[in-house]
Amino acid sequence: MARRPVTGDCFRAACPARDVLNHVSNRWGGLVLGALLDRDLRYSEIRVRVGGISEKMLAQTLDVLERDGLIVRTSRPVVPPHVEYALTANGRALAERLVELFSWIGANVQAFVRAQQRYDSRLESARA
């Protein structure tokens, strides 16, 4: 009898899949993966592509994504050092899905802005 593969359950607090979910759905992880979808990039290129990310947060994000097996870091022995980051097969599959989400959010951003404005207006009215 073949064993079924063990799958994660992000709804369980102790599941390791929840850690990966956190890494890719936080403020920067998904954006870094999306930035790498078109081609391999150097650190500075990722920083330019992902506007607003600090050097510290980019370094931490790259480390976490590499640990999760979503990206691979390649260092070329030249002066100055040449380091590139690329998606793994799992990273590519995930980045494709994230970019679809980014596109959907972008296409619907005006509806979100209107909802936020209505909410803020009601909140201000309630405070008055």
Image: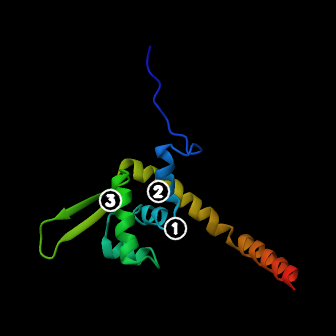
Left or right side of 99 for 87: left
Q: Residue at x 74, y 74 (%)?
A: 116
Going by the image, does 115 lie left or right of 101?
right
Label 1 vs label 3, nearer the camera: 1
Question: What residue is shown at x 48% (from left), y 45% (from top)?
Answer: 17
* Helix, strand or loop status at disc 2: helix
Residue at horizontal 32%, vertical 76%? 44
- Of pointers 3 and 2, the one earlier in the residue sequence: 3
Label annotation for residue 27: 1
Asked which secondary structure carries label 3, the reply is strand
Which quadrant: the N terminus? top left
Residue denoted by label 3: 86
Residue at 47% across / 67% down in the picture? 28
Q: Quadrant of the C terminus?
A: bottom right
**Disc 2 residue type (three-letter):** Ala
Q: Secondary structure at mark 1?
A: loop
Question: What residue is shown with label 2?
Answer: 95
State whether residue 56 is above or below residue 39: below
In three-dimensional space, the C-alpha distance between marks 1 and 3, rounded to whole angstroms, equals 20 Å
Q: Is residue 39 visible?
A: no
